Image: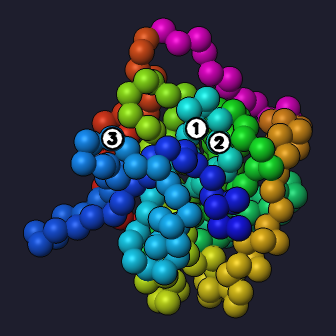
Amino acid sequence: MHRSYFQGRADVYARYWFNASGKSGYTPALDEKQKPLPLTNAIIKGHLLGIEFVGIYPLLADNTTYFLTIDFDGKNWFDDTLAVQEITQENKLPCLLERSKSGNGGHVWFFFKNPVPAWKARQLGKHLVTQIKSINSQSFDRLFPSQDEHSGKGFGNLIALPLNGKHVKDGNTAFINQLGEPLPDQWQALSSCQKISESSLNSLLNSIKITPPSQPESTNKEEDSEKENSQIKTT
């Protein structure tokens, strides 16, 4: 079930790393020939058991995505996630709140029944962020996917998977309620989160001002292109 919600690229995934000097981040998992390793059920199981910490790439090869995530970090992150949830409830958009690995940030997750164009998902995210910024949100960090389209370089930005077996014991990488407490049954929370159809997404986008992607004028259109293959954010 985990994989049916958190569907990213299956031909590559990222591993979390850290060293003695205190540096840490994520890097694509590679074989001995430096070719990307595929994301398998065994890798997902290892993540859920806490054996390793895995990140996935939400922007698929055809520039679609199965989910949208709004990332908040630092001061007031929890209040801002609640503000997003309140707005989504008004628009009847199901979502889940997750506290990140560090415990000092959070993600708001939206899931789609089928892959939708990434630019559409991101327009939804931008609309929600614009609304909470009107109430002085200061913790918004980024959207995932972080790009509308691939530039042809790298895999796009990655996001860490929730429900890591090591950290969920501390209430991190876990889905939380409006009091900031881990939900009593994480799997029930996930399975009961309704996926959004593209027709519902289109209906919402038709009611707001959106900016469809323009025709490419260069080979590099990605935001944060220097971060495509190594995501150093560890929250």
- Identify the residue at image location x=35%, y=52%: 29
State the separation of the CA atoms marked 3 and 1. Answer: 18 Å
- As displayed, is residue 234 above or below residue 150? below
The residue shown at (80%, 49%) is 113
Q: Which mark is residue 60?
A: 1
Q: Which mark is residue 35?
A: 3
Is mark 3 in CB contact (under 8 Å) with mark 1?
no
Looking at numbered disc 3 in the image, what kind of residue is underneath it? Lys
Decide: is 197 above or below 90. Answer: above
Question: Crowding near pointer 3: few (<14 within 10 Å), some, many (20+)?
Answer: few
Q: Does residue 157 belong to the magenta stretch?
A: no
| Residue at the image position 77 percent from the left and 80 percent from the top | 188
Check disc 2 and report its element: helix, strand or loop: strand
Element type at mark 3 = loop
Image spot of residue 224 (x, y percent):
38, 37
Q: Residue furthest front?
A: 32
Whether the residues at callouts 2 and 1 have beta carbons within 8 Å, the answer is yes
User: Residue tagged by mark 2?
Assistant: 65
Q: Name the amino acid type tagged 2.
A: Thr
Please provide the residue range marked out in magenta: 206-217
Q: Is residue 173 visible?
A: no
Tell me the quadrant of the picture where the C terminus can be found: bottom left
Mark 2 and mark 3: span between their CA atoms? Answer: 23 Å
Predominant secondary structure in magenta?
Answer: loop
* In this picture, residue 113 sits left or right of residue 128: right
**Dot 2 crowding, Cα within 10 Å, few <14, some 14–19, many 20+:** many
**Mark with earlier residue (2, 3):** 3
Q: Label 1 crowding class (10 Å Cα cut-off): few <14, some 14-19, many 20+?
A: many
Residue type indicated by callout 1 = Leu
- Which of the image's four quarters has the N terminus? bottom right
Q: Could you tell whether 231 is left or right of 130 in the image? A: left
